[in-house]
Amino acid sequence: MHGMLRLLSSGRRHRTDRARGFTLIELLTVMALLAILMAVVAPSFREFLQSQYVKSVAYDLTADLLLARNEALKRNGNVSIEPSGDSWADGWTITELVNDTQVGQRNAADASVTVDDGPAGITFDANGRVFAPAAQVRMTLSAAGTNHRCIQLDLSGRARSVVGACP
């Protein structure tokens, strides 16, 4: 009986000493599966990132339009918001027109984000209404030609962001 127990215990010790680490075949199998998974996930992840860039810029622009309107009401004067460069995607600046005081500023968006149909500037009067331009403001934000969001500003000065391109 003791001889059989000794035989079993020595076999266990020997097996545990051998079973350490990974074999090359196991490592290559895991690497191949990871490569396949990354090839499948990468395109959808890129689209997800672009939609998040557009959503972020739309949120910032909507919030800053509301800020400009509120500043016009608070200061009882005209406040404008204008693009910093050639496009709203280059960032924008909020300025009180009476004292030429800068109220806020936003930096340029990610390079993949474009803004179409944006006016040269938007001015709110002391009542919080859109003073200029006279027409309803609609700007379409997009990234890589997809992931559209529409920023709408009615004449009363309320801004909102809607999923999809502007009509």
Image (cartoon, grey):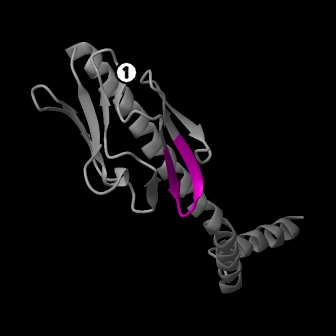
Q: Quadrant of residue 64?
A: top left
User: Residue 126: where, in percent of width, then height?
Assistant: 27, 16
The magenta segment is 139-150
Q: Quadrant of residue 124?
A: top left
Q: Is residue 46 left or right of residue 56?
A: right
Mark 1, other Cα within 10 Å: few <14 / some 14–19 / many ≥20: some
User: Residue 116: where, in percent of width, then height?
Assistant: 46, 53
Q: Residue at x 60, y 48 (%)?
A: 165
Q: Residue at x 79, y 69 (%)?
A: 6
Q: Is residue 153 above or below residue 25?
A: above
Q: Residue at x 46, y 44 (%)?
A: 56
Quadrant of the frame with the C terminus: top right
Q: Is residue 111 left or right of residue 44?
A: left
Q: How many marks?
A: 1
Q: Nearer the viewer, residue 89 or 80?
A: 80
- Kindly report the secondary structure that dominates the magenta region of the rendered protein: strand
**Residue at the disc numbered 1:** 129
Work out which residue is located at the far bottom of the displayed protein and give it.
24
Quadrant of the frame with the N terminus: bottom right
Q: Nearer the viewer, residue 16 or 141?
A: 141
Q: Is residue 147 magenta?
A: yes
Q: Is residue 55 magenta?
A: no
Q: Amino acid at mark 1?
A: Arg
Q: Nearer the viewer, residue 135 or 77?
A: 135
Q: Is residue 145 above or below residue 22?
A: above
Work out which residue is located at the far left of the displayed protein and give it.
99
Work out which residue is located at the far right of the displayed protein and give it.
1
Q: Secondary structure at mark 1?
A: loop
Q: Is residue 122 above or below residue 89?
A: above
